[in-house]
Image (cartoon, grey):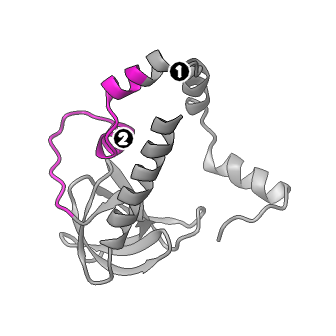
Amino acid sequence: MKKIVFLTVFILLFSCTLFAQIRSGGTVWISSRTATLKTSTGFFASESGTLQMGDQATVLQVSGNYAQVRSTANSSLSGWTAVSNLSARQIVSTGSGASASEVALAGKGFNQEVENAYKAEGSLNYADVDRTEAISVSRDDLFAFITEGRLNTGE
């Protein structure tokens, strides 16, 4: 239990440090496999483009967990993306074929060895987690669910 608490605190401190470095006017690099750019910070905002891992961008403004960025290579390509897709340090894509989640977890200190250690120590049912992660819901179905349930769409 102490390990989980320590790990959680470490991740939060690391995240706060990373987010603090993303500032208006600063240069950032895309740290996820792809970063979808949107017209606003809303979940259902229309997409305005996509940047790839390692692409360089300029931060136009930051609002909460989102940043409005403009591609350095293509100044007509701009939009909002999650700050978690950005790095203040240069990212070099190695073309290793690692998934976006593997890259994100590796940046937080997780790898297959760490996962195997957790599996060996604990009694968590990873099969259920894997099945849950495999569930996919289309944006249209999600929007219909939120609308019909009169929930806040986050716009």
Left or right of 138? Residue 72 is left
For label 2, the SS is helix
Q: Please tell me how many numbered marks the rendered image carries.
A: 2
Mark 2: give few (<14), some (14-19) or many (20+) Cα within 10 Å.
few
Query: Residue drawn at (47%, 47%), measured in percent from left and top?
Result: 8
The mark nearer the N terminus, 2 or 1, is 2
Amino acid bearing label 2: Leu
Point out the residue furthest to the front here. Answer: 2
What whole-number distance in Å separates the C-alpha atoms at marks 2 and 1? Answer: 19 Å
Point out the residue furthest to the right here. Answer: 149
**Front residue of 138 and 84:** 84
For label 1, the SS is loop
Measuring from the top left, give residue 84's x and y in whole percent.
40, 59
Q: Write down the region rendered in magenta.
A: 89-117
Q: Is residue 94 located in the magenta-colored stretch of the structure?
A: yes
Point out the residue furthest to the top here. Answer: 120
Q: Is residue 24 visible?
A: yes
Which residue bears the numbered disc 2?
105
Amino acid bearing label 1: Gly
Which of the 4 image quarters holds residue 153? bottom right
The N terminus lies in which quarter of the figure? top right
Query: Residue drawn at (40%, 26%), measured in percent from left and top?
Result: 115
The image shows residue 108, relative to residue 152, as above or below, that is above
Left or right of 93? Residue 145 is right
The image shows residue 134, relative to residue 88, as above or below, that is above
Which residue bears the numbered disc 1?
122
